[in-house]
Amino acid sequence: MKIVGLLMMIAGVVFGVYAGLWWAFIGGIVDVINAIKAPELVAMSIATGIAKVMFAGLIGLVSGVIAIFPGYALFNMR
């Protein structure tokens, strides 16, 4: 069980970094830039991009915790 718990914790960290940093933060910046460069300005595209950037830390934290907490519990089982 310790190996499964350790793998879940590692996967949680990796997924949290991916979701928070790559998808939300960098993806949000790219969304805003693409929306501004578009021939027709759509406010919803800019708003969702800004929201993704603003909540990137929370998104990364929640997505990582989903796997880290159960992995920690499995790691500490006897």
Image (tube, rainbow, N blue to C red):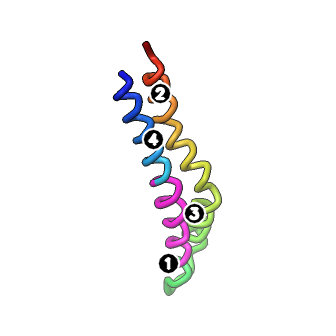
Query: Which label's residue is closer to the chain start, 1 or 2?
Result: 1
Amino acid type at mark 4: Gly
Q: Would you name the residue on which mark 2 appears?
A: 70
Query: Which label's residue is closer to the chain start, 3 or 1?
Result: 1
Q: Main secondary structure of the magenta part?
A: helix
> How many marks overall?
4
Query: What residue do we see at 55% from left, 62% from top?
Result: 25
Mark 1 lies on a secondary structure that is: helix
Mark 4 lies on a secondary structure that is: helix
Q: Distance of mark 2 from mark 3, alpha carbons?
A: 31 Å
Q: Is residue 68 left or right of residue 44?
A: left
Q: Quadrant of the N terminus?
A: top left
Q: Would you name the residue on which mark 1 appears?
A: 34
Which range is magenta? Answer: 18-33
Residue 19 is one of the magenta-drawn residues: yes
Q: Quick one: label 2, few (<14), some, or many (20+) residues within 10 Å?
A: some
Give the quadrant of residue 53: bottom right
Mark 2 lies on a secondary structure that is: helix
Q: Would you name the residue on which mark 4 appears?
A: 12
Mark 3 and mark 4 residues within 8 Å of each other at the beta carbon: no
Amino acid type at mark 3: Thr
Return the mark for residue 56: none
Q: Distance of mark 4 from mark 1, alpha carbons?
A: 30 Å
Amino acid type at mark 1: Asn
Query: What residue do we see at 53% from left, 54% from top?
Result: 20
- 24 lies above or below 46: above
Mark 1 and mark 2 residues within 8 Å of each other at the beta carbon: no
Q: Would you name the residue on which mark 3 appears?
A: 48
Q: Quick one: label 4, few (<14), some, or many (20+) residues within 10 Å?
A: many
